[in-house]
Image (cartoon, helix red, strand yellow):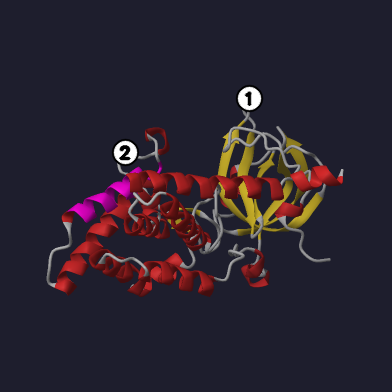
Amino acid sequence: MGRQYINQFSEGESINQVFVANGKQLRPNRQGNLYLQLTLSDKSGSVNAMQWNANQSVYDSFENGDYVIIKGTTQLFNGNLQIIVQQLKKADESRVDEADFVTLTNENIGQLIVQLRQFVDSISHPQLQSLCQQYLDSKDIMEKFSQAPAGVKNHHAYQGGLLHHVVSLMELAESVVQHYPEVDRDLVLAGVLLHDLSKTDELAYERSLEYTDEGQLVGHLVMGVELLGKQIDQWEANQGTTFPNDIAIQLKHMIVSHHGQYDFGSPKLPMTLEALVLHMIDNLDAKVHQFSHAMDSEANPGDNWTPFIPTLGRKLYKKTLQQKKQS
């Protein structure tokens, strides 16, 4: 029998297979007894897991990012699936099929890169176009860009997800600027390219998806502005001239404001049309992906509603108009 992936689990199933372990914590319950809490993942997603009556020896037997063999049972808790672990041991990596754990975009990476380059080629402002092209000409940037996720859990959380997200935003931007001709197309496309680019270093994604130390301590907004400064310095050295300061400032503003709200980590609110458009299409693409993924991966496909989803702050209604017509 082949492997059953996390997104195929249902309540009350017996589990005996390999996962990637992360986020391990050894905690006391109200009676002072220790339990192990961790996140298990494969290429289809992740699931929370608990082992009651754990001890320091179990906790020390593996590290975050290790493959572990889990024996346990699935159960629903507050509407979400989790695994109650009866036995956990570190797996022999030589016997693990890594293809079960590399989460890739469904899109063709090569085709996405072609589309990305076509959008950048179409930027009409010469200095802005050549700066963006400089990013794409960097072997180091593009190797990471083609592999990085756009997030750890919330949206496009798979290898290649960042590239998929950026190309999707460029397609959305094209529609928006046609409808609103007062919006500068070149700036929006450049902002789309740069806004999340430092997630390539904010996140770690070789085996499991998690934050790097720099990502936790600094974050991709600040890292993105720092990278832009380095790229402008390189551009000026190569071109022998000064990059337009007003464009540099607007690009920095788009990077730091694209989360749109102070509560979401932006130190500035969008204060230009282009920054506003970037924030809105970024949020739209992320939310649509979150909704779709939550509904597609939900553990009870026969129900009309998902359980409450904490990251979205709501339940989701899954029955489509087409399904209503058929019922």
Q: Nearer the viewer, residue 121 or 152?
A: 121
Overall secondary structure of the magenta section: helix
Local secondary structure at mark 2: loop
The image shows residue 305 at horizontal and vertical percentages of 74, 37
Labels 2 & 1 near each other (Cβ < 8 A)? no
Q: Earlier in the sequence, mark 2 or mark 1?
A: 1
Q: Is residue 239 left or right of residue 147?
A: left
Q: Residue drawn 33% across and 59% down? A: 186
The image shows residue 30 at horizontal and vertical percentages of 63, 25
The residue where tag 2 is placed is 267
Image quarter (top left, top right, bottom left or bottom right) of the C terminus? top right
Q: Nearer the viewer, residue 305 or 177?
A: 177
| Residue type of the residue flagged with mark 1 | Arg
Magenta stretch: residue 182 in it?
no
Magenta stretch: residue 249 in it?
yes
As measured in the structure, the alpha-carbon distance from the residue carrying label 2 to the one carrying label 1 is 40 Å
Give the farthest residue toward the top.
Answer: 30
The residue where tag 1 is placed is 30
Q: Is residue 326 left or right of residue 77?
A: right
Q: Residue drawn 64% across and 69% down? A: 99
Frontmost of labels 2 and 1 is 2
Give the farthest residue toward the left.
Answer: 241
Q: Residue drawn 37% across and 53% down? A: 195
Q: Is residue 289 left or right of residue 188?
A: right
Residue 307 visible from this viewpoint: yes
Local secondary structure at mark 1: loop
Image quarter (top left, top right, bottom left or bottom right) of the N terminus? bottom right
The image shows residue 92 at horizontal and vertical percentages of 65, 67
Q: Which residues are magenta?
A: 246-259
- Where 179 falls versus 115 (above or below)? above
Q: Nearer the viewer, residue 183 or 3?
A: 183
Q: Which of the 4 image quarters holds residue 126?
A: bottom left
